[in-house]
Amino acid sequence: MIRGHYMPRHTNSNYVRPGVSPNHPMFGRYLSTVGFPPTQTVYNHWRHWYQPGHLWWTQPPHLQHRFSSFSTVRHPFNRPPRPPDPYNWSSWRQTGILPYTQPRRGLHLSAGLMDRSEREPPPKRRKSADGRLAAERSQRLPECSPPKGSRSTKGSPEWLHNVTGIPVPPGKFPSSPERTEATPELKRHWEDLSQLCNAASAKGRKQKWPFDFSVMSYNILSQDLLCDNTYLYRHCNPPVLDWHHRFPNIIKELEQHSADIMCLQEVQEDHYKQQLKPSLESLGYHCEYKRRTGLKPDGCAVVFKRDRFSLVSCHPVEYFRRGIPLLDRDNVGLIVLLRPIDPHSSLTNVCVANTHLLYNPRRGDIKLAQLAMLLAEISRVAQLPDSSACPVLLCGDLNSVPWSPLYRFIKDSRLDYDGIPIGKVSGQEENPRGQRILTVPIWPRSLGISQQCQYESQTRDSDLKDLEQTELDGFTSPSIEHCLKLTSAYSHYLKESGQPEITTCHSRTAITVDYIFYSAALGDAMAQAECSVPPEKGLQLLGRLSLVGKDELQEVNGLPNQHNSSDHLPLLTRFRLHP
Ligand code: KL2
């Protein structure tokens, strides 16, 4: 037994992953089941697959993929062998050690390759445009279901919640003789920006009763997606991936930060209904939720403290549009209009939008169209009687990096997209394959959203649909705009080291994809002058919880780990709203 040492795969057959016993329930639960290999055989494969400390960016350059050092997709060439997924029958069959004794109906066997076309990478199962509902659920269950004869009963939700099948107390690993030393905790500190506010513009608005509130954006990593993509978590000590370990950690984290408004992504519906919503309600939150379409099991939640805000209206946004091939994905957004509860003054409403845009790094065209749909709905919801907008918060996982065209579009309110390859829109891959460039227009007119990201009038006279009108609307020029002035609450570089901030990290990537954008008031710390709006229409950023770089994440073995139970970090900010 070798402990606490990094041993490359396949070099030492005596290597046993620290903290995992061959008798670990992760393996043992299959023992007595039909056709499953003996525990020791399963375990031997598993221990070869797990790579403690295996984080993509820590590999020496000659071992990294030749196209990209930071990669978020699996490449067909030079990629490491596909892992046997201990929760997936078909995966074990691939290893050759599992006799062909299928415990359940038709399993989908993902090829593990992303082809050169622009389909969504296969590991996250995708719907087909039609018949998507029934097919999907029936395929999902077997893969996440225990083989017949195991402890869980048929269709037991427990299995879907729990990887290893055993409850783990918060922050603890199941008792195991090989238990390793505790993972150190990430250090994040509060950055106070309240003094940075431009004194001149702040002058004259020293309110007696400023309304300060905090906002969090957090992708909590749905257990279902975790199960579907175990290859991303090879570096993790398996017990930390157990939902029974993760949920208490996540709820504790939410409670500790105690944000007034939280925008959560990858919230699995059953976990939301059975655990998250009841817990948050007991902490004084009002909860709104929108599941992804196509029977995808997760979605976005917006929750806020009942004693700080009241709900004016709630607007789920589905990006799936039947009949528009570009909009055939199941991502969603959720917008709420909130009224601050303040006995001292009457304050403007705040519009809070939460979304999780498409992951596929090659489909920037879809991401931009999804974003346009969200921006159109935000503009409608946030509109005030004088046609200006109330302060907007746009939070979420945009699956795009800060130096990407998509990010620039949000910040600059405009994007000239002539000649931009669709694989470059999100910046997730440094060297995306495929040269297809964004078409003009990006989304078809039939979507009913203008190039200014506004809903087009429903009552448009059909005569106006001629070429002249099309030109007038900008549908023939390669540029898009929106009317919101948005500023990012984070600067995307660490103050101390100048390194990029990281919001998501697993064995294949370490990048920023999560954001809190806001309408910055004049004189705000982060806003450029031209990006600010009059104080009464904007927010002043008071502070934020610092992020970390990849070096700090490497020290805690990446994400998720013992303390951080998602593959994302929560963003946390504090704002002031002026009467
Ligand atoms: O990047 V994410 O993780 O914001 O944390 O958003 C998506 C990805 C999420 C919802 O689709 O699932 C993850 N490789 C890696 N991660 C994937 C893949 C993939 N092929 N497909 C989906 N996700």
Image: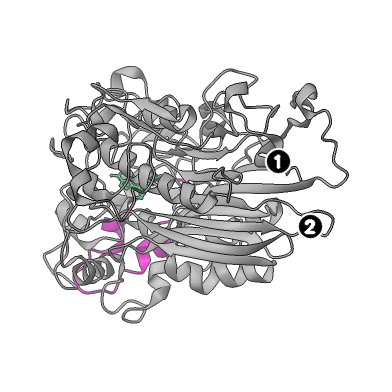
Query: Can residue 131 be seen from the camera position used here?
Result: yes
* Above or below: residue 74 compared with residue 265: above
| Residue at the bottom extreme, as displayed | 153
Tell me if mark 1 has few (under 14), some (14-19) or many (20+) residues whose alpha carbon lies within 10 angstroms of its own: some
- Element type at mark 1: helix
- Element type at mark 2: loop
Could you tell me which residue is drawn at 55 percent across and 63 percent down?
Answer: 313
Q: Which secondary structure class fits the magenta region best?
A: loop
Q: Inspect the magenta stretch and tell me whether residue 478 lies in it.
A: no
Could you tell me which residue is drawn at 45 percent across and 37 percent down?
Answer: 513
Which residues, given as a range, are shown in magenta?
14-43
Of marks 2 and 1, the one in the foreground = 1
Q: Which residue is mark 2?
A: 342
Could you tell me which residue is drawn at 56 percent across and 44 percent down?
Answer: 389
Q: Which residue is mark 1?
A: 536
Q: CA distance from mark 2 to mark 1?
A: 15 Å
* Above or below: residue 73 compared with residue 22: above
Which three-letter amino acid code belongs to the residue tagged 2? Asp
Q: In x, y percent, where is residue 7?
A: 39, 34
The mark tally for this picture is 2
Which three-letter amino acid code belongs to the residue tagged 1? Glu
Q: Inspect the magenta stretch and tell me whether residue 32 lies in it.
A: yes
